[in-house]
Image (cartoon, grey):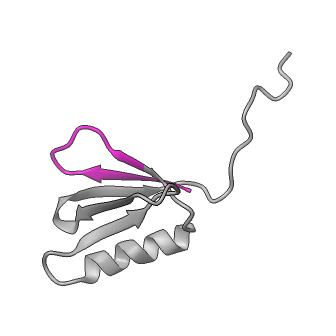
């Protein structure tokens, strides 16, 4: 699952590939937003690296599709 994270005052978004489902990612976001001041949103990618963003700096979080899309031109030849 691909998750894009927009950080305020940063021109590029963070793109994280994770094994979590869309529901799990949304739950992590909700937990981070409901925490007291100074909360952080943290997610681990498929390689085990952890991305931590302060909730106050979050601009947006875009959760990708659960299923992978086929690659290729699909018989356009």
Residue 12 spot, x, y in % from top left? 29, 39
Which residue corresponds to the image point at 20% horizontal and 43% vertical from the top-left? 10
Say whether residue 8 is magenta. Answer: yes
Q: Disc count in the image?
A: 0
Residue 73 or residue 51, whichever sits in front: 51
Residue 5: within the magenta? yes
Identified at 25% across, 61% down, the residue is: 53
Picture quadrant of residue 35: bottom left
Residue at left 83%, top 20%?
A: 76
Relative horizontal placement of residue 4, taking residue 76 as reference (left or right): left
Please state the extent of the stretch shown in magenta in the rendering.
Answer: 1-15
In the image, is residue 21 above or below residue 47? below
Farthest residue toward the top? 77
Residue at 86% x, 25% y: name it: 75
> Residue 2 location in percent, x, y?
51, 52
Vertical placement of residue 28 versus 58, above or below:
below
Residue at the far front in the pictured view: 48
Determine the image quadrant of residue 49.
Answer: bottom left
Q: Position of residue 58 (x, y in %)?
A: 24, 59
Quarter holding the C terminus?
top right
Of the pair 70 and 17, the residue shown nearer to us: 17
Horizontal and vertical percent position of residue 50: 37, 61
Which of the image's four quarters has the N terminus?
Answer: bottom right
């Amino acid at each position: 699952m691909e998750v894009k994270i927009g950080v305020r005052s940063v021109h590029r978004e963070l793109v994280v590939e994770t094994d979590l489902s869309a529901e799990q990612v949304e739950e992590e976001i909700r937990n981070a937003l409901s925490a007291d001041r100074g909360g952080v949103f943290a997610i681990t990618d498929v390689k085990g690296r952890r991305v931590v963003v302060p909730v106050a700096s979050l601009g947006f979080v875009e959760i990708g599709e659960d299923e992978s899309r086929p690659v290729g031109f699909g018989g356009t030849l």
